[in-house]
Image (cartoon, rainbow, N blue to C red):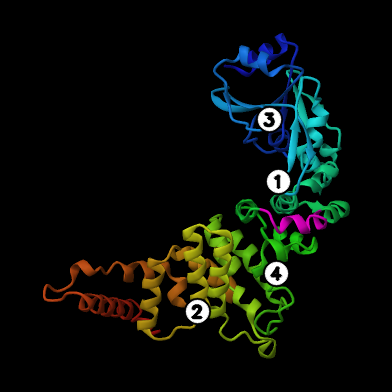
Amino acid sequence: MTETAFIEAIRSMGGTVYLVGGYVRDTLLGRKPKDRDYVITNIEEAAFCRLFSSAEKVGNHFPVYLLPIRGEMREVAFARREKKTASGYRGFAAHFSPETTIEEDLARRDTTMNSIALRLPDREMIDPFGGKQDIERGIIRAATKHFAEDPVRALRAARQAAELGFTIEAETVNAMRSLRGELRSEPQERIFEELKKALAAPKPSVFFSALLEANLLDIAFPELYALHGRPEILAFHPEGDSFRHTMLVLDEVAARTENTMVRFAALVHDIGKGRTLEEMLPHHYGHELRGQDALLEWNERQKLPREWLQAGLFVVQQHMRAARLKKPGKIVDLYTAIARSALDFKGFTDIIAVDYHGLPYYLADSDLYERVMKVHAKNHPDDLAGEAVGAWLRGQRIHTLRRLCGERNPV
């Protein structure tokens, strides 16, 4: 079904169709829109079902249907109002009727940039809360008081700032702070979804810094909050504290790779510093061991993707020693560990390069790594078995490393 046919069918029953949300926002941002979601008004649900008998209803508490429009399944929602009835994101009662206006529907949305509609087919813009102007000014602003009714909207505002490089205006920051109590009881799955999207942003640190400003970081990500104010040795980390150092590493790694797993590993590389004893500061001896415990506790709370957890644990374990190895056997052991980890060689070395402001020869030369790791156990002598095969393979890789580096004689 074409979009024109869909619009005309709705209009034939006295209804009106609007494009909403991400489509309008992305269009105004000059981006190619990903979503094309519709809201309809002035029509009964029963009439809609008669028009589109094959429509699939997917909304449990209010009417949302899937229809094939422009060759893809698109969401068509009835305009609705919401009333807060209890804490949390489920604590809402939805009301919808043909009389519900598009302005009422837009009022329940989070920020002004997402509270704009285009009426179809004439594409007249409905912008009751000044979203277009806020986009032009680079401002994240709560659309209405309804913003403070869902605690995860605070994380969304922070994430939008990271994605777009926008500033969250002061009253919205205050509204975010007011959600502190409710955020404590939010399902961790919702918090993780915002983390995943924030890590895909061009500058992910903005997300965490915004939550810190709004006094929410300790609730959403306590392991990261523990880094705030933890002093560093300035000769190594002139950023001054462990949180700022972590944010700097995260953003610089993000500039090198779009892989969110690698970015997550960069985010957690130093989380053990949040558990350093006061009398040890500004030194953080053993933080790689404490960091493993911290990350495992994070996983208990939030159930991280398995590969994210593995990658994070590997970087926490290895980042202090990876750039300081001298003996060829230790270098080969690191190569083998990288090959067995969830990370690839580039992902691991991106993190180490940023953390150490450079790489030793054995991590800077990916060809060296690949050639050493091409030595396989399948070529072992026939009289070897079990652990002897592993020892033979390690020895052959050490020999290969020495041979390849012979001219420079670094090992």
Circle 2: element type: loop
Q: Position of residue 150 (x, y in %)?
A: 75, 47
Residue 166 shown left or right of residue 185 in the figure? right
Q: Residue at x 67, y 57 (%)?
A: 203
- Decide which of tag 4 and tag 3 comes sooner along the chain: 3
Which numbered dot is residue 62? 3
Q: Are marks 4 and 3 in contact (CB under 8 Å)?
A: no
- Decide which of tag 3 and tag 2 comes sooner along the chain: 3
In space, the residues marked 2 and 1 are separated at their CA atoms by 46 Å
Q: Residue at x 75, y 11 (%)?
A: 14
In space, the residues marked 3 and 2 are separated at their CA atoms by 56 Å
Circle 3: element type: loop
- Decide which of tag 2 and tag 1 comes sooner along the chain: 1
Circle 1: element type: loop
In space, the residues marked 4 and 3 are separated at their CA atoms by 38 Å
- Decide which of tag 1 and tag 4 comes sooner along the chain: 1
In space, the residues marked 1 and 3 are separated at their CA atoms by 15 Å
Q: Residue at x 70, y 83 (%)?
A: 234
Q: Which residue is mark 2?
A: 323
Q: Which residue is mark 4?
A: 225
Q: Position of residue 354 (x, y in %)?
A: 58, 70
The image quadrant of residue 379 is bottom left
Q: Residue furthest top?
A: 12
* Amino acid type, callout 3: Phe
Of tags 1 and 4, which is closer to the observer? Answer: 1
Q: Identify whether 360 is placed above or below 27.
A: below
**Which residues lie in the magenta part?**
176-186
* Amino acid type, callout 4: Tyr
Which numbered dot is residue 120? none
Q: Which residue is mark 1?
A: 89
Task: Residue 41: say if magenta.
Answer: no
